[in-house]
Amino acid sequence: MATGTVKWFNETKGFGFITPDGGGADLFAHFSEIQGSGFKTLKDGQKVSFEVKQGPKGLQASGIRPE
């Protein structure tokens, strides 16, 4: 499981980007991939763990777990 930091996340649109700790391009993050119950959102600068998968427009974060 990879780790990273939320670069930005738009609650209204339900998506944002995560900067991986290991370097490389920022990863797309969609609210549907956030683990947990209730309102699913992320905060700028928040540490997260995640898997990386191929999405329709490139690599994206999957199974996002806020730390």
Image (cartoon, grey):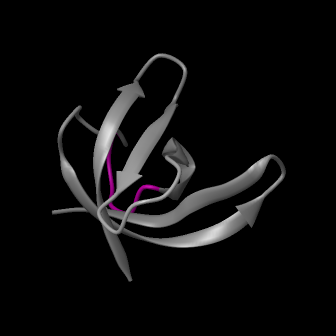
Magenta span includes 38 = yes
Q: Is residue 57 left or right of residue 31?
A: right
Along the line of sight, which residue is nearer the eye, 27 or 14?
27
Q: Position of residue 64 (x, y in %)?
A: 40, 62
Q: How many marks?
A: 0
Image point 32% across, 46% down: which residue? 38
Q: Is residue 12 left or right of residue 53?
A: left
- Give the answer, above or below, for where 1 lies relative to 64: below
- Quarter occupied by residue 8: top left
- State the residue lying farthest toward the bottom: 1
Along the line of sight, which residue is nearer the eye, 53 or 26?
26
- State the residue lying farthest toward the top: 12
Q: Position of residue 5 (x, y in %)?
A: 26, 50
Q: Is most of the magenta stretch helix, strand or loop?
A: loop
- Give the magenta part as a residue range: 34-39
Image point 40% across, 47% down: which residue? 18
Q: Is residue 15 left or right of residue 60?
A: left
Q: What is the quadrant of the N terminus in the image?
A: bottom left
Image point 61% across, 56% down: which residue? 60
- Quarter occupied by residue 46: top left
Image point 56% across, 70% down: which residue? 52
Q: Position of residue 24 (x, y in %)?
A: 48, 58
Magenta span includes 35 = yes
- Quarter occupied by residue 62: bottom right
Along the line of sight, which residue is nearer the eye, 21 or 54?
21
Q: Position of residue 32 (x, y in %)?
A: 55, 50
Q: What is the quadrant of the C terminus in the image?
A: bottom left
- State the residue lying farthest toward the right: 56
- Give the answer, above or below, for where 15 lies relative to 51: above
